[in-house]
Amino acid sequence: MTDNYPTPKWLLNLFETFYDPCPLSTEEMRSINGLGVWKDKNFVNPPYSEKDKWIDKAIEEHKKGKTVVLLLPCDPSTKWFMKLIGARAHIFFSFGRIQFSEAGHARYPSMLAILS
């Protein structure tokens, strides 16, 4: 099973002026370039199996004054969710489950965490 699904086009369109440090690509691209190169405004749909390191990087970049939007599974019972709350992220919950093109619907609700 993979967690490497492309962000739905309608959602990407909302953040079309944002840089995507974690594009759908190879593992090497995501782990080397993605965690190293961020711009002033970033939209991140991280692999959910590695979301902790991407959330840590997002908080680090936010402390430098950058804006970061993360597409994440909705799970307020986790330590990473509490990290986002501690970093004063704005959380927006989706109603229903996001359709990930050929992969079908997500297995769980999603949320956007915005650090701005």
Image: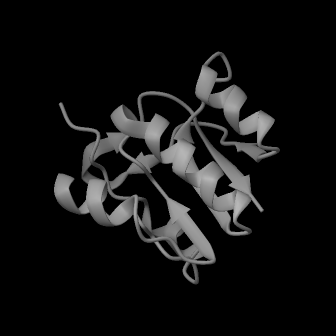
Viewer-proximal residue among 93 and 34: 34
Up the image or down, 68 lies above or below 41; here it is: above
Measured along the vertical axis of the image, is residue 23 above or below residue 2?
Answer: below
Colour convention of the picture = one colour
How far across and how far down the image is residue 85, in percent? 78, 35
Q: Where is residue 67? Give x, y as percent.
A: 69, 67
Farthest residue to the top: give it: 77
Q: Give the left or right position of residue 105, taking residue 95 as reference.
A: left
Query: From the image, which quarter does the N terminus lie in?
Result: top left
Direction bottom: furthest residue: 17
Q: Quadrant of residue 105?
A: top left
Whether residue 22 is visible here, answered yes or no, is: no
Name the residue located 45 percent from the left edge and 41 percent from the top edge.
53
Query: What residue is rendered at 62% in x and 60% in y?
Result: 61
Give percent across and percent down for residue 19.
Answer: 50, 76
Left or right for 96, reference 108: right
- Say which residue appears at 72% left-offset and 58% top-offset: 63
Q: Which quadrant of the figure contains the C terminus?
A: bottom right
Left or right for 38, reference 17 = left
Task: Measuring from the top left, give residue 26's x and y in whole percent.
Answer: 17, 58
